[in-house]
């Protein structure tokens, strides 16, 4: 009987050698440790043994059973490991390879400049007021003193959108200035008899129906500034914008104001800063003039104050408007405005 146990063990272990997958392993389990496996037969025949034989055979039979079960567990582990190795090999997944670099996003150069402008204005007491991008003709033009048919509208060809009225069509705002009217009306509504003074910045995207060239786009950002109160003068406008220029372009930035015309301000001006690339010497960016045009500004026109609910006999104010893309172009010497919305990562990654 002991001899038979040795044979059972040897046969089972030998058969296990050729077991290479789960399916074969299950078959082996049934055949060699299952209910009708040879080792189980030995247990059944135990009763037939003589009293003397029983202890030795019993001990040996247990050893074989434990050995076979241990061999089964070991083989199961080996199959699992082999399976993993095979899938690593076949799926060509090398877990030791370094990962692919993740591309980090960044803040768009126009947004960077926009935020810088807003931060400086905020330090100077101008609170951000956001206004809508779809505007009515009334707000975008009429309340800003561009009557229907006014020639200045020519400079701001518009994208019209559906849903407006015949005498007041809807359009994509061509500048941030209509936000002036919306803000004044909202502030004035707080106390119509005694409207509070205002100091706000109005940032946002504007749209014009233009030929796209290296110098003009159909969409661009603007930042508008508006201050309204009693006794605000043109000196306040100049002082504020000179201070802004020094914070934006450096402590020694020189400025000059040139007369201009805008329907919604009177008088109106444009502010230039001394070219920060050549320091006034004259270069290709400032077109040899030594000056860069930065913004439009002026004293808020009485009609505009009136439209906003502020009595022009009591209140005055100043306003200004500038383009972050233009400033970013000047600062970084970007020659073509189309890069801004071209979505080319090679351009955007440089900022
Ligand atoms: N809205 C003008 C434009 O888009 C820019 C501008 C000029 C805004 C003078 C102002 C201003 O507030 O006072 O061309």
Image: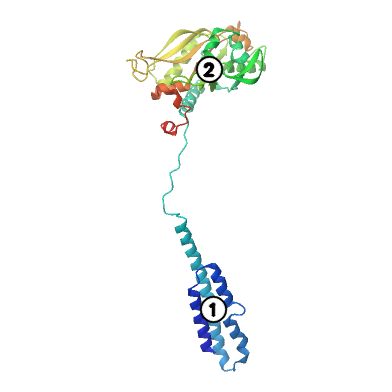
Q: Which residue is mark 1?
A: 66
Residue closest to the far top: 313
Picture quarter containing residue 243?
top left
Observer able to see residue 121: yes
**Residues at marks 2 and 1, CA–CA distance in whole angstroms:** 88 Å
Task: Indicate the quadrant containing the N terminus: top left, top right, bottom left or bottom right.
Answer: bottom right
Queried on whether the Cβ of the residue with tag 2 lies below 8 angstroms from ligand 1, the answer reads yes
Locate residue 183 relative to residue 88 in the image: left or right: right
Q: Which residue is mark 2?
A: 225
Q: Dot 2: what SS?
A: strand
Density class for disc 2 (Cα within 10 Å; few <14, some 14-19, many ≥20) is many
Mark positioned earlier in the residue sequence (2 or 1): 1
User: Disc 2 or disc 1, which is closer to the eye?
Assistant: 1
Residue 224's spot in the image, x, y percent?
Answer: 53, 18
Q: Dot 1: what SS?
A: helix
Residue closest to the far left: 281
Queried on whether the Cβ of the residue with tag 1 lies below 8 angstroms from ligand 1, the answer reads no
Residue 139's spot in the image, x, y percent?
Answer: 61, 15
Name the residue at 57% across, 77% down.
31
Q: Find out whether the residues at labels 2 and 1 contact each other: C-beta distance under 8 Å.
A: no
Q: Nearer the viewer, residue 329 or 237?
A: 329
Picture quarter containing residue 137?
top right
Name the residue at 54% across, 71% down.
25
Observer able to see residue 196: no
Residue 69's spot in the image, x, y percent?
Answer: 54, 75
Residue 145's spot in the image, x, y percent?
Answer: 58, 9
Name the residue at 39% across, 25% down.
332
**What colour-coding does the image apply?**
rainbow
Q: Vertical placement of 245 versus 57: above or below?
A: above
Name the residue at 57% across, 13% down.
228
Q: Which mark is residue 181?
A: none
């Amino acid at each position: 009987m002991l001899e038979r146990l040795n044979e059972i063990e040897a046969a089972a272990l030998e058969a296990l050698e050729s077991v290479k997958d789960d399916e074969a392993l299950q078959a082996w389990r049934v055949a060699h440790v299952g209910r009708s496996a040879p080792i189980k037969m030995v247990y059944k025949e135990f009763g037939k043994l003589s009293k003397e034989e029983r202890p030795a055979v019993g001990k040996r039979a247990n050893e074989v059973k434990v050995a076979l079960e241990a061999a089964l567990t070991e083989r199961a582990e080996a199959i699992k490991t082999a399976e993993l190795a095979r899938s690593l090999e076949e799926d060509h997944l090398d877990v030791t390879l370094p990962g692919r670099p993740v591309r980090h996003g960044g803040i768009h150069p126009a947004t960077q400049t926009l935020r810088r402008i807003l931060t400086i204005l905020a330090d100077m007491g101008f609170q951000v007021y956001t206004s809508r991008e779809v505007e009515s003709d009334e707000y975008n033009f009429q309340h800003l003193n561009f009557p229907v048919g006014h020639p200045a509208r020519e400079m701001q060809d518009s994208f019209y959108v559906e849903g407006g009225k015949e005498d007041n069509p809807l359009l994509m705002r061509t500048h941030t200035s209509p936000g002036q009217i919306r803000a004044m009306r909202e502030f004035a509504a707080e106390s119509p008899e005694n409207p509070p003074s205002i100091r706000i910045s109005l940032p946002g995207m504007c749209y014009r129906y233009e030929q796209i060239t290296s110098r003009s786009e159909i969409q661009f950002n603007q930042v508008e500034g508006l201050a309204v109160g009693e006794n605000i003068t043109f000196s306040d406008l100049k002082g504020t914008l000179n201070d802004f220029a020094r914070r934006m372009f450096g402590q020694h930035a020189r400025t000059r104001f040139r007369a201009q015309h805008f329907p919604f301000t009177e008088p109106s001006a444009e502010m230039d800063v001394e070219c920060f690339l050549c320091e006034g010497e004259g270069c290709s960016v400032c077109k040899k003039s030594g000056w860069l045009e930065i913004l439009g500004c002026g004293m808020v026109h009485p009609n505009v104050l009136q439209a906003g609910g502020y009595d022009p006999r009591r209140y005055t104010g100043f306003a200004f408007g500038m383009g972050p893309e233009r400033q970013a172009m000047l600062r970084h010497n970007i020659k073509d405005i189309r890069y801004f919305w071209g979505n080319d990562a090679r351009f955007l990654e440089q900022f």
